[in-house]
Image (cartoon, helix red, strand yellow):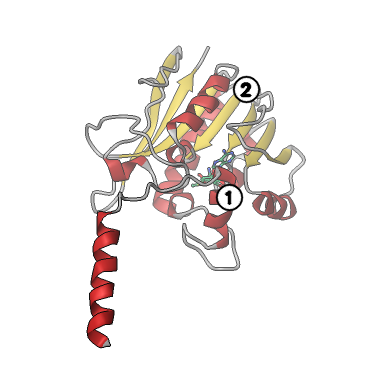
Amino acid sequence: MFLRFSISRKLFMKKKAMEPKKQKKPWPTKDAMIQVYEKNLWGGNASEFYSGDGSHDVNIVKPYIEVVTSFLNSLKNGLIVCDLGCGDFNIGKQLVKQTKKYIAIDIVPNLIAYNKEQFKEENLEFRCLDIAKEELPTADCLIIRQVLQHLSNAEVQRIVAKLSAFKYIILTEHLPGGDFEPNKDIISGQGIRLKKKSGLNLLAPPFNFKIKQQQQLLSIPLKNNKGVIVTTLLKVF
Ligand SMILES: C[S@@+](CC[C@H](N)C(=O)[O-])C[C@H]1O[C@@H](n2cnc3c(N)ncnc32)[C@H](O)[C@@H]1O
């Protein structure tokens, strides 16, 4: 009896091993992001929305707030800023006062509902939108911080098609340290390009985003060869 079970198990395992490896099925990005927050896949306590250590580690956040504040204050008139993928708003909440108006967008409905309760300023507005699928509000400056790194090339492409309407873009991406082949494709919501020794470069193929000027504002190397978090100011027109 035991022998028969063991043989049929072996046959089953062999058959399984010969089957072609199943492709990871892409989830809709919205469902993937909802799950990230529900299951605290980026860390934090079960009771909170947590957008990851990149949004909370003081060594990463403090210099970022300093350079972005300095840029926002360098312009005579306050800017209308739109924050695409605002997350738990630990970053955005420190920038609102430096702007004429701050529109914070995310794809996760509960997160936006929570942020609306939590953060109240006269010049602050939250909206729940899918930035790849829906129209973006009018603004002078976009903040896109550690968002595109989570999205497939097809989704990034749809977002890039809307970017030329904004004068300034402050883009932050988690990249490999040193040289790398940019823009290897990933499935949205299933890790970032770093696992493929790649990272996003909007100016390179297949995106070829056209800008007037770019300036690196900040580059923060992470411990244990875990790459760098780079913030770049793009002047679009
Ligand atoms: C790693 S978090 C970064 C949050 C914030 N920008 C920060 O730096 O603290 C990425 C955020 O992008 C949001 N996001 C991803 N895809 C999106 C989409 N298509 N439309 C709107 N938000 C999106 C996620 O829900 C998540 O809150």
Residues tagged 1 and 2 counted as in contact (Cβ below 8 A): no
Give amino acid for label 1: Asp
x and y percent of residue 161 in the render?
54, 20
Q: In which quarter of the image is ligand 1?
A: top right
Badge 1 residue CB within 8 Å of ligand 1:
no
Q: Residue at the spot x=69%, y=55% of the render?
A: 114
Question: Helix, strand, or loop for circle 2?
Answer: loop
Q: In this view, does 45 lie to the left or right of 114?
A: left
Q: In this view, does 190 lie to the left or right of 159?
A: left
Query: Which circle marks residue 31 in the picture?
Result: 1
Classed neighbour count for the residue bearing mark 1: other residues with Cα under 10 Å, few (<14), some (14–19), many (≥20): few
Query: Which circle marks residue 140 in the picture?
Result: 2
Q: In which quarter of the image is residue 185?
A: top left
x and y percent of residue 42 in the render?
47, 57
Quarter of the image containing the N terminus?
A: bottom left
x and y percent of residue 218 in the render?
38, 35
Query: Which circle marks residue 39 in the picture?
Result: none
Give amino acid for label 2: Asp
Question: Helix, strand, or loop for circle 1?
Answer: helix
Badge 2 residue CB within 8 Å of ligand 1:
no
Q: Is residue 20 left or right of residue 78?
A: left
Q: Where is 200 relative to 6, above or below?
A: above
Q: Which of 146 and 97 is in front in this view?
A: 146
Q: Which of 202 and 16 is in front in this view?
A: 16
Q: Residue at the spot x=23%, y=75% of the render?
A: 7
**How far is mark 1 from mark 2, CA to CA?**
30 Å
Q: Residue at the spot x=41%, y=20% of the render?
A: 214
Of the two numbered discs 1 and 2 on the same chain, state the one appearing first in sequence.
1
Q: Which of 122 and 9 is in front in this view?
A: 9
Q: Where is 205 relative to 179, above or below?
A: above
x and y percent of residue 123 in the render?
74, 37
Q: Nearer the viewer, residue 69 or 163?
A: 163
